[in-house]
Image (cartoon, rainbow, N blue to C red):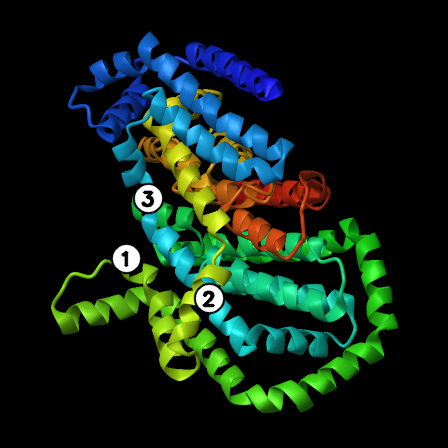
């Protein structure tokens, strides 16, 4: 307990010095950020009054506390991963009891649509697992790879990348990790490196198209960019970075792959026997349910990918204004209901809700959203964004700085909060003609690839961590960094080069 208090007090002191040192100045960028902050907190004041308020000693203290609490939660998670839920709950309680954050605003700031979508996806994934879909797909991957471990990791990477690009990162990691877990049960191998590979490939794919990541959706609407621009700028880079991921993974996980190859070679006959046994004993008896599950999974992927078109058609038919993002939230539940009438008894749904949903992850997400909002609400995040934006005025340097700084912050902070804070800065630079709209892609790449650095860098990472722990697969920060550090750094370097070349 003494150690925890020392860490918290130290972070408060450091945060206070940082917030006191950073002063948003009376310039165009500073006034715009100050006005944005006033709108966020509900202050009906002019830009100059907002600037004075955000720089006041009172708000410096509040900013310091919110930043310190956020960093405290991160520190506790790094020290002991199993403490993360306790730490995040403690952090939110501290913010409420100290008056730093308004409880009502914290509740309103939580992305409940994402939370509901996540719960629904987990329940639907649980249904597909009960139907035997993931075991069937895992066996198909083993069958196609034919004992070739390089083909195995290639198939896992491409599947994670593709699902994240055309559906979203949460759906991708839930379903791909189900496959990895099935492979673990079949081969009885250590799958920690495969879990990390799945997450890295998922985050890489999530940057390919706007629907793959919440930050992509946010940037799409805030910047005025078109989907065709994402296809032109983001998709090619994501594909290149997938190849970089595959090649570098073979290098950094060389020892693991050699051991895996030996295991696969040693138990090749066992694998073949298992596949044969599956088809003769299990598949024949569950063929109908497996086929229903596969059809549901394919339809689900297409429904999510075509969400906007479906909503447009429904809006015209029903003569109602349906919000696409809200409709997307309930797509998993639509397929849960379809499964109830085609393959799963009603009474099993309540059991699946308790067993398939990672309630620890859900709790962590809700509290993390609140903590992330607090550093934006108090102005701490805007101050950090302002400080970073004043380092250089060169167009290329600004874009590169935007990418690198957002990537660095996204490794330890909620990447959506980072992007929300940096977007006004990017908009101002773009409107002033200092940089091209490509700067928004710098934000996208920084947020998406920066999340690969740590186990808590993105939503997909946290979901994977919790799902793995439930299967007794505990991932340490050291193990994560041993694979992700080099790969992510090269991916970010490639993204920076891409931004410079496509200016």
Q: What x and y, as percent, mark residue 219?
A: 37, 45
User: Viewer-proximal residue, 284 or 251?
Assistant: 284
Please give the label number shown on residue 326: 1
Secondary structure of the residue carrying numbered label 2: helix
Q: Is residue 253 above or below residue 294?
A: above
Secondary structure of the residue carrying numbered label 1: helix
Q: As drawn, which residue projects farthest toward the left? A: 319
User: In the rendered structure, which disc, 2 or 1, sits on the residue that comes first in sequence?
Assistant: 1
Q: Nearer the viewer, mark 3 or mark 1?
A: 1
Please give the label number shown on residue 223: 3
| Residue 56 visible in this rendered orientation of the protein | no
Residue behind mark 2: 352
User: Viewer-proximal residue, 298 or 228?
Assistant: 298
* Residue drawn at point x = 28 percent, y = 70 percent: 310
**Badge 1: residue crowd in 10 Å (few <14, some 14–19, many ≥20):** some
| Residue 112 visible in this rendered orientation of the protein | yes
* Residue drawn at point x = 46 percent, y = 60 percent: 354
């Amino acid at each position: 307990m003494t150690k925890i208090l020392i860490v918290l007090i130290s972070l408060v002191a450091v945060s206070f010095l940082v917030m006191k040192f950073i002063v948003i100045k009376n310039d165009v960028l500073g006034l715009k950020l100050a006005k944005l902050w006033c709108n966020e907190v509900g202050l009906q004041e002019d830009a100059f009054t907002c600037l004075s308020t955000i720089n006041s000693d009172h708000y410096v203290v509040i900013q310091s506390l919110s930043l310190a609490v956020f960093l405290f939660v991160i520190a506790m998670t790094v020290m002991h991963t199993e403490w993360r839920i306790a730490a995040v709950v403690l952090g939110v309680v501290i913010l409420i009891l100290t008056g730093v954050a308004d409880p009502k605003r914290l509740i309103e700031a939580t992305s409940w649509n994402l939370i509901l979508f996540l719960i629904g996806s987990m329940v639907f994934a649980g249904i597909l697992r009960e139907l035997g879909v993931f075991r069937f797909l895992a066996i198909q991957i083993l069958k196609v790879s034919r004992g070739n471990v390089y083909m195995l990791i290639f198939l896992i990477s491409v599947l994670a990348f593709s699902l994240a690009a055309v559906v979203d990162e949460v759906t991708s990691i839930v379903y791909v990790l189900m496959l990895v877990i099935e492979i673990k049960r079949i081969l009885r191998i250590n799958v920690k490196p495969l879990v990390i590979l799945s997450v890295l490939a998922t985050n890489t794919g999530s940057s390919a198209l706007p629907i793959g990541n919440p930050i992509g959706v946010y940037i799409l609407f805030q910047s005025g960019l078109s989907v065709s621009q994402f296809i032109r700028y983001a998709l090619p880079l994501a594909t290149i970075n997938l190849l970089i991921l595959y090649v570098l993974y073979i290098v950094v996980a060389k020892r693991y792959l050699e051991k895996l190859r030996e295991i696969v070679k040693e138990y090749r006959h066992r694998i073949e026997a298992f596949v044969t046994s599956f088809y003769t004993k299990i598949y024949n008896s569950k063929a109908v349910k497996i086929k229903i599950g596969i059809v549901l999974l394919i339809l689900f992927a297409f429904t999510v990918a075509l969400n906007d078109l479906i909503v447009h058609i429904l809006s015209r038919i029903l003569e109602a204004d349906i919000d696409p993002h809200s409709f997307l939230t309930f797509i998993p539940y639509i397929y849960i209901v379809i499964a109830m009438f085609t393959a799963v008894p009603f009474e099993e749904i309540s059991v699946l809700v308790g067993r398939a949903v990672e309630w620890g992850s859900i709790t962590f997400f809700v509290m993390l959203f609140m903590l992330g909002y607090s550093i934006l609400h108090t102005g701490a995040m805007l101050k950090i964004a302002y400080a970073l934006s004043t380092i250089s005025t060169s167009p290329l340097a600004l874009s590169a700085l935007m990418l690198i700084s957002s990537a660095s912050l996204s490794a330890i902070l909620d990447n959506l909060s980072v992007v929300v804070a940096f977007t006004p800065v990017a908009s101002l630079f773009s409107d002033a003609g200092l940089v091209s709209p490509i700067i928004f892609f710098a934000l996208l790449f920084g947020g998406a690839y920066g999340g690969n650095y740590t186990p808590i860098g993105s939503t997909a990472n946290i979901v994977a961590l919790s799902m793995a722990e439930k299967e007794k697969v505990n991932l340490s920060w050291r193990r994560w960094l041993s694979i992700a550090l080099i790969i992510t750094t090269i991916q970010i370097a490639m993204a920076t080069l891409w931004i410079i070349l496509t200016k």
